[in-house]
Amino acid sequence: MRKFLFLIPILFFSFPLFSQTNIKGNITNIENDEVVPFAVVSICQYQQNKIISYGVSDSLGRFELKVPKKVKVFDIKVSNVAFQKLNRTVAIDNKKNDLFLTLQLTPKTTTLDEISIVEYSPIIIKEDTTIYDISHFQETSDQTLEEVLSRIAGVKIDADGSIEVNGKQVQKVLINNEEVTDVGAAIITKSIDPSIVENVEVRFDEKDNKIKDSILDDNQLVVLDIKLKEDFDTSLFGKLRGTIGTSEEHTQIGGYTNLFSLKKKAKFHFFGEYDGFGHQSISLSQIKNIGKETLNKIFSTPANFEALSEKETFNEDIYGFNSFFQSNQQATFGLSSKIQLSKRSTLFIGTYNQAPKVKNAQYSQQTFLTNNEEQLFENNVTNDNFSTKNKIEYRYDADSIKVKTNANFVFNNLESQHSDITPENNYLTDFNNSDIQFYQNAIVEVLTKPGIGIQWKGNYAFVKENNDITLKHDDERYGIYLQDEDNNTLYDFTQNRLNRNQNFIQQLSFNYKSRFGNFTAGYLFLHNASEIKKEGKNKDNELINTSLFTANSSELKYLQHTPYIEYYFRQNWFNIDLKAGYNSITYTDQNFVNQQKNLFELKGRLDIDVFKLFNTSVSYKQFPSSYILSNVAKGLNLKNFNTVYAPPIHEYSPQLDQVIDINIYKNFAQYQFNVSMGTLIGKSFNGNINDLSFYPFITQVGGQLPTSYQIGYLTLEKRFSDVPLFFVLEPAFLFNETTNSTIESEFKNESKRYIVKFENSSAFKKIPYNYDLMCRYSQFHFQTESSNASDTQEMLQLRLKNNFYLFNRSVAFSPFVDYILFYNSSDASNLNLGGEVRYSKQNFSIFLEAYNLTNSTEFIMQQLDPSVYVVSQQSVFGRYLKVGLEVKLK
Amino acid sequence: MKIQFTFYFTLLLIGFTSGFAFCQNDIKITYTYGHNNFPELKSIGTLEASSSTSKYYYEYNQGKVVTADGVHLYLPNFSFNWYTDTKGKSVGVKDEKKGRIVHETTESISWTITDETQEILGYTVQKAYAPALDGGFMIPPLDGVENHKKVIAWFCPDLPYTFGPHKYNGLPGAILKIEFENRHDFCEATKIEMGQNYADLSLPTPTSEDLKVSSQDFNIRKYSNSWWKKNMK
């Protein structure tokens, strides 16, 4: 008897090995719900062709297969000669022993887009990967993958095209597990047609060293991998579009081309667009990692509000609106290629160019905070820009060596005419700004022994900026600043500013990986030098030597030596990253004397999955703020028709910026419910002193007054599985505080913005209607200590877009209404009615677009600057009609 | 009149082609049998398959081969049909002088699918293997190797039929090639014709006049030692 006892543990342990999950289902024809008999059903390992189980549906279209219990995610492939192949990814609930699938096949005579599958999860979560079935979220009217992604719970797309998934920023976008281009998410997600995408896989901890930027860095890299349909030919695909649009001002032909060729050895992407109406498909500002950004590729959170408000997403986040222009004529083209030189080396070449012509108009009321003077003016701006961003990059990836070197050339030219008319005076300001930027960067990483590595980073940058500003006016008071050598007021004044800046950074670090964590010790050396020439000139272009706007500053210097140590430790449920550095800085101060200052730099980040319930991320950093040498250069800067910048008069030195970022995210997958909340606090010392002693000029004296901001948000997202509805509720606040000072006192200005946004959209597949609804309530409160004055503006916005599908979904009629009501401090309303009718076939579509048929162009904005409160009535895009033909190349 | 004629003709054409297109989803695969050691020994087999049923027809025309040992072998004419459905039921039918002999089986093959692939006629086929099958050969073991260990099938997942030549079936795609681990004979698809119509194809029902035989008998009668030894010179 005893000899059989050994069988007991074997039986005990072997039982789970033999346990299996039953996969049952039936197969029907999507067009008429008739059963599809004798279809071959194969279950394959996820994302591989390895068949785990297979069978054939019976005469009633039923099938039953078994898979080992340990298989939680798999691909199910169904084929029958009369139907198009169906390939779907399926996840099994841990608690279930049976899974029932209803699979619908599309007859070969109809389009591939209509394949659908029900009773399975469109979002699959496995360990560090989430897979989204794109066809489930796609609507007939969707033109880009970005539109589909924006409809998925947990996916957030910013106005600049950057993507956040489950509260984490996507750092790379891949196609079929390969990097096609390294210039940001937007260029791909705004280009790819969703009908060619099988699924989108987000990997929160990319393991592939070739994709990772560093072989030494253990930080989690979040990538979004677009898996194209298995049988899709990637040798040439994309979209061509021709349009003709008309408004009250002009009629114009436009065009758009977006082509990909993704072959094994060489990948090309070309896009070009010229359009005079509405938004362009891809903006040059959405092209990332070229030029200055290559210096600081990792997303950094600005510590000061000014930088935050300059972000493209700001207006969209605060006002839910981004078209603050009257007209917008854009010409854009880009070409990039990635060539596989050998198994380990790749070459990337990219050129992106844009020439927009934009017109803005607004009526503004300025209230000066310290003297309570009020100024009304009408402002008209015409901008004519040209920008080019170019990059060539070589990469070498081996198991123990990684080399990346790139050269970037950026050129910007802005010609801008401003006309500012007050009841008393006229001011015409012409700006002609151009800059040439060259950046060269290199990173070399070597793993010398297992766990021991060396990293070297170097870069050199040269930036030459030319800023010419000409102010023509009829304001006698302007003699206060604008004088000739005989102290006569100049009514036609020009300032030319030339800034040559060179930047040189070297960083060497040693990395040691052990089971106790990843230790890094490094040293950074930074050298920045500027030479600035300012010239004040009269209308005959003669130099005025005595002008306050004429000065030369050479040998402006900033030197930084930073030894630092970093520790990184990662466990399944938490990771911690700590960095401490000691900055020894030599800089040119406001008196042109080289000074020395030491600053302690600290960065800490903790990602923790609290009790496996909430993903929480807490980070704190204090770091030397960017010390801009041109701020201490001698002489005044004419900034615009009523603002002058003067170099600092008080002590001016490098300061520490501080940022605290806390995010909590929870995905209740079983309820299709996401909760995220967070707060972001930034504090810096870069506030200028805004002085009105030389009224009507605002004199900004370079200063280091404290400024701060706080952002808080809570997002609740719910998707219903029985009814295809999606709800988002997002209350948020944004506070910012600036300080200003007069000779007598220092005072604070406070802006408080509260926003509650509610979104609801549908994704009905069986009824020919869907909608997107957005309601937003905003309250902006502005307060200043200088006069104890305050102002409150409220805004209510309702946006409803309907999608009616006709003729078997080949025609989509999408009328929209966007109504904004401004009340409390300023009353106004904006009613924008428009829509689109689109007839789509498999390879082409024809559309008619109407925008703002009521020609409603009023939009109220407020801004509280340190010295002035501005209420402006923006004139936004007027009505237009556009027809177009779009052809898909597949 | 001309317009009316054109209209009706067009309607007729559309009706005809759409009806034609609807039914034409079946497949015909022609296989060539060969033997690595006897290149001159070639024969043809044909598989006709709808998604539910297949009929495999094999015919060998009388021929002579000389083995490595100098033995002359004479093979007589013979032919058989092999029907299979998706449930794995197979019926072999052979007409002999005495009448029709029939073998029915539901024997299933336990295939192991591998990741190995190759191309046949432009299709990617995947390798699967199974233990030796009784009566699994199409032609006699000419080089003296009677027992094989494994049968290797190359199936095409892009052709969604679960059928193949002879009694080989049950893979998630039509079998385009059969070979054996330690034998030198094989059969490989040489022609694929899509758009066939085998809607009427079904498994034959044996009648009382048929001689129902076992698998062994069916195979013995196919290439029994008695006839080829008798023909030896």
Image: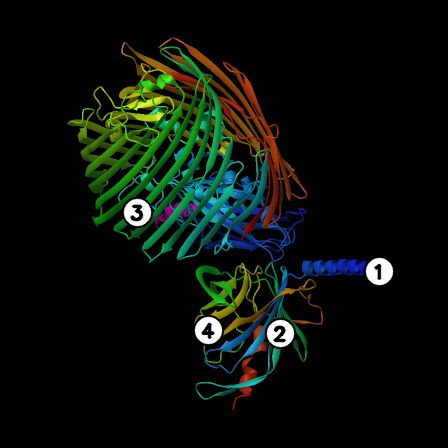
Q: Residues under labels 4 and 1: Cα distance?
A: 74 Å
Crowd tier of the residue under label 2, counting other residues whose Cα lies within 10 Å: few below 14, some 14–19, many 20 or above: many
Crowd tier of the residue under label 4, counting other residues whose Cα lies within 10 Å: few below 14, some 14–19, many 20 or above: some
> Magenta segment, which residues?
A1-16
Q: Secondary structure at mark 2?
A: strand
Crowd tier of the residue under label 3, counting other residues whose Cα lies within 10 Å: few below 14, some 14–19, many 20 or above: many
Give the residue displayed 50% in from the left and 31% down from the top.
A671
Tag 3 residue: A407
Q: Is residue A5 part of the magenta span, yes or no?
A: yes
Name the spot of residue A813 as percent of width and height, x first: 64, 37
In terms of depth relative to the viewer, which is nearer, A329 or A518? A329
Tag 2 residue: B80
Q: In the visual, does A834 lie left or right of A46?
A: right
| Chain letter for mark 4 | B
Q: Residues under labels 2 and 4: Cα distance?
A: 22 Å
Q: Are marks 4 and 1 on the same chain?
A: yes
| Chain letter for mark 3 | A
| Chain letter for mark 1 | B
Q: Are marks 3 and 4 on the same chain?
A: no
Crowd tier of the residue under label 1, counting other residues whose Cα lies within 10 Å: few below 14, some 14–19, many 20 or above: few
Label located before the other in sequence (2 or 4): 2
Q: Looking at the picture, which amino acid does disc 1 mark?
A: Met
Q: Is residue A449 visible?
A: no
Q: Secondary structure at mark 1?
A: loop
Q: Secondary structure at mark 3?
A: strand
| Residue A816 placement: quadrant | top right
Name the spot of residue A124 as percent of width and height, x first: 47, 41
Label located before the other in sequence (4 or 1): 1
Tag 1 residue: B1
